[in-house]
């Protein structure tokens, strides 16, 4: 009797499971794509705001203080506009933004993230901003390269050209911070202009027992260091074709190999801290600020902390060039914003975007640790922050902002971190490293 | 030795026997209804299980089946998926990186499971023989790592393993400056360094379990063993260890699952580095799903991991367990 009971129960549960499986089988993940909203390609745009009350919903990740202050300053100038800015953590944002933007309650403005928003571009959920760009003249008010970084073709395969999908609020830039008193002790009075001069100084530091460059390669600073090398040896248009996904873009080239070999050579020569693979960016910055190295590779986001801890002892230079005549380069991207194709208040949102390049917005953006799109209006803040602003103006003038290497394909970041760590530990050949990341990029573009 | 252990069982188990015997009416009645096959009342009894059952189906069984279903597709999480059958599983078995992660997880089992159990047993062997003052304090102290969030533990250890961290400072005091390094950046030692964090976190749990287990052992047993001339080691091997078998199975199961399913410690300390030396299945699953947007492959990885864990638990019960039969 009990035996029959169990087997009957077992049969029943099997039946239940089978039924569930059938229900599941009926649905293929992803489902039907709904009717695509208007992509805005033939819409009327206006730069004049009507006087009626407008409310904008905004969803964002970075710089809650900055966004609050920018919104406050904008709404003071435009009292009939209300912006409800909702802060979300990065992890939640990248997971939810696709769903949020395809829902009936999509926010009007959403912080742009090329990786997470790829499908939204394909599905025409992001408004093409070119009509606004023409109407407002954004190509003059924003740095050209930083707008290019926010352009994409309609399949979200090739960046850097096509339609404009976002507008930058705060910009970022990598380069070398240096310790002025360590430099003085080593007898270094002038900062290097070329890679050759830099190499001489690194050797001077190493001979004196000072760590030449502090690199926090446990997380992402190894990529910044390698990216800086690429900017020196690889022609900018070749690099941009590669990172933006242009057909035929290639990193497995003699120029890139020279850059990568130089990187490996420096690692082997002891020009990086011995602990490079074991410390992250934050720890590397702290150790540099404590006077443990001559240089630090990092970005503008570390400047406020360095300024606070080192004061006038700290300086910043864009990474040196191959020859003095070459353009001044750096890796950087921006905190940028898109408009939903579903938004009925796009004119007001675009007016807010235009405000980001204004003289009013620049000091707010600068005080929150970003570089303002309006480089000329960046305020004097003293110390290393001023050196950073000066170098930033030069990079903008030279069209020298390159996207970070991990933009080349969604899956490339982990391979970059791991490959660069392996090269630092002399466990991977530069040629193999380049071949492996080119393969990831090729596979990505073949599959999609 | 084994003989008096057997004879001791009725005495130790006796309290529970009385409780069952104390309410004979109820269980007997239930048995009668089942035997007479009173169908309606049996169905009525299912109503009590229903809320939990619905909850379990909705939040455990259904998502699990759903995950398996996803694993048969190539899907980016948004647009329409393509059916690929079992090829995601084939990829897991052939991809060196994915296989490497499974291998790393198996190495972590030594650190998360074997080491804590070994240390826990030794400590219990030392503490169990006599009643000592302040046991509650020590128990709390050793259990503390269990209460802390793993992310906080990971961040703290990341500092301790740093170039200027506690680890290297201690080595410096001992005059071992020559071997100091940034431990998490060392290709050969990073996985062991991560493993030791797990040992630290889980030793307390094992000790707690074993201490509680040892307290239910009849002290007469120890006394009898001592009269028979057994030393501390004999006592440990013949009384403490066999009596703790149930607890060892529990500890081994919990800690092995923790090792195979590890994610948070690795994520905050090395994120798989240096050069992929500390990748674990949980970490790759997260990357595949949320940064590479290969939901199908991630789901297949999850299913593989679940099967691996179930197999490990089954093995533990078979090899160490057989508690049920006793």
Image (cartoon, coloured by chain):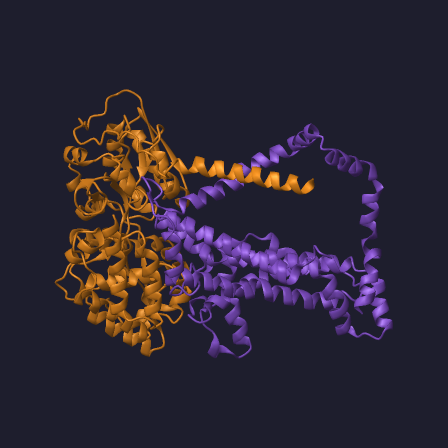
Chain colours: A orange, B purple
Answer left or right for A401 relative to B32: left
Q: In this view, does A444 lie above or below A344?
A: below
Left or right position of A212 against A155: right
Tally of numbered tags: 0
Where residue A259 sits: x, y (%)? 22, 67
Picture residue at 44% right of the left edge, 35% below the top:
A23
| Residue under the point 45% across and 51% down | B302
- Residue at 54% across / 38% down in the picture? B57
Q: Which of A53 and B1 is in front in this view?
A: B1
Q: Is residue A85 left or right of residue B47?
A: left
Against A62, residue B304 (above or below) is: below
Q: Percent x, y for residue A423? A: 32, 69
The answer to which image quadrant residue A58 occupies is top left
The image position of residue A324, as x and y in percent, is 14, 65
Vertical position of residue A16 compared to residue B269: above or below: above
Outermost residue to the left: A325
Nearer the observer, B76 or A351: B76
Residue closest to the eye, A358 or B245: B245
Q: Position of residue A293 (x, y in %)?
A: 36, 68
In the picture, which quadrant includes the N terminus of chain A? top right
For the question of whether residue A311 can be seen, the reply is: yes
A257 to B10, vertically: above or below: below
């Amino acid at each position: 009797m009990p035996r029959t009971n169990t087997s009957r129960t077992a049969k029943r549960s099997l039946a239940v499971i089978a039924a569930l499986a059938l229900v599941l089988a009926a649905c293929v993940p992803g489902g039907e794509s709904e009717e695509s909203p208007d992509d805005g390609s033939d819409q009327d745009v206006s730069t004049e705001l009507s006087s009626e009350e407008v409310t904008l919903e905004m969803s964002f990740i970075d710089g809650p203080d900055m966004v609050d202050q920018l919104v406050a300053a904008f709404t003071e100038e435009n009292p009939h506009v209300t912006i409800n800015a909702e802060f979300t953590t990065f992890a939640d944002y990248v997971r939810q933004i696709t769903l949020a933007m395809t829902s009936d309650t999509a926010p009007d403005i959403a912080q742009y993230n090329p990786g997470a928003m790829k499908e939204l571009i394909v599905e025409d959920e992001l408004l093409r901003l070119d009509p606004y760009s023409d109407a407002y003249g954004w190509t003059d008010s924003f740095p050209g390269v930083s707008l290019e970084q926010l352009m994409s073709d309609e399949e979200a395969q090739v960046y850097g050209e096509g339609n404009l999908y976002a507008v930058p609020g705060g910009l970022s830039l990598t380069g070398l911070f240096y310790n002025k008193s360590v430099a003085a002790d080593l007898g270094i009075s002038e900062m290097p202009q070329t890679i050759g001069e830099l190499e001489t100084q690194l050797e001077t530091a190493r001979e004196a027992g000072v760590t030449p460059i502090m690199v926090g390669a446990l997380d992402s600073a190894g990529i910044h260091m390698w990216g800086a090398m690429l900017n020196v040896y690889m022609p900018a248009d070749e690099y941009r074709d590669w990172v933006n996904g242009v057909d035929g873009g290639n990193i497995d080239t003699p120029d890139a190999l020279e850059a990568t070999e130089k990187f490996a050579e420096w690692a082997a020569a002891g020009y990086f801290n011995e602990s490079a693979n074991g410390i992250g960016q934050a720890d590397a910055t702290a150790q540099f600020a404590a006077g443990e190295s001559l240089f630090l590779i990092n970005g503008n986001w570390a400047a406020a902390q360095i300024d606070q801890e080192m004061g006038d002892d700290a300086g910043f230079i864009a990474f040196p060039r191959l020859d003095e005549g070459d353009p001044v380069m750096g890796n950087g991207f921006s905190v940028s914003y898109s408009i939903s194709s579903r938004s009925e208040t796009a004119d007001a949102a675009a007016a807010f975007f235009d405000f980001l390049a204004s003289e009013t917005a620049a000091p707010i953006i600068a005080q929150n640790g970003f570089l303002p799109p309006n480089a000329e209006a960046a305020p004097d803040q003293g110390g290393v922050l001023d050196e950073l602003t000066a170098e930033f103006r030069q990079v903008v003038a030279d069209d020298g902002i390159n996207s970070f290497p991990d933009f080349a394909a969604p899956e490339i970041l982990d391979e970059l971190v791991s490959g660069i760590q392996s090269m630092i530990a002399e466990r991977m050949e530069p040629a193999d490293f380049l071949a492996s990341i080119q393969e990831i990029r090729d596979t990505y573009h073949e599959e999609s | 030795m084994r003989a008096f252990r057997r004879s001791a069982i009725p005495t130790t188990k006796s309290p529970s026997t009385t409780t069952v015997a104390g309410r004979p009416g109820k269980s007997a009645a239930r048995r009668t209804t089942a035997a007479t096959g009173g169908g309606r009342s049996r169905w009525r009894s299912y109503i009590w299980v229903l809320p939990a059952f619905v909850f379990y189906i909705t939040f455990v069984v259904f998502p699990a089946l759903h995950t398996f279903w996803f694993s048969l597709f190539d899907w980016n999480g948004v647009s329409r998926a393509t059916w690929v059958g079992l090829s995601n599983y084939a990829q897991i078995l052939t991809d060196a990186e994915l296989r490497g992660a499974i291998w790393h997880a198996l190495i972590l089992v030594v650190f998360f499971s074997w080491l804590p159990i070994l240390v826990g047993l030794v400590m219990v062997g030392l503490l169990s023989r006599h009643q000592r003052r302040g046991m509650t304090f020590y128990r709390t102290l050793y259990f503390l790592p269990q209460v802390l969030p793993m992310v906080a533990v990971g961040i703290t250890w990341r500092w301790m393993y740093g170039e200027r961290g506690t680890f290297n400072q201690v080595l410096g005091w001992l005059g071992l400056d020559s071997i100091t390094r940034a431990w998490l950046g060392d290709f050969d030692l990073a996985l062991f360094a991560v493993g030791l964090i797990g040992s630290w976190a889980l030793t307390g749990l094992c000790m707690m379990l074993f201490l509680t287990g040892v307290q239910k052992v009849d002290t007469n047993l120890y006394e009898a063993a001592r009269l028979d001339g057994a030393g501390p080691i004999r006592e440990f091997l013949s009384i403490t260890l066999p009596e703790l078998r149930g607890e060892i199975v529990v500890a081994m199961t919990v800690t092995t699952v923790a090792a195979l399913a590890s994610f948070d410690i690795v994520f905050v300390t090395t994120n798989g580095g240096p050069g992929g030396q500390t990748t674990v299945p949980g970490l790759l699953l997260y990357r595949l799903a949320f940064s590479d947007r290969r939901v199908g492959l991630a789901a297949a990885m999850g299913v593989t991991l679940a099967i691996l864990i179930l197999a490990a638990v089954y093995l533990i019960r078979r090899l160490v367990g057989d508690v049920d039969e006793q």
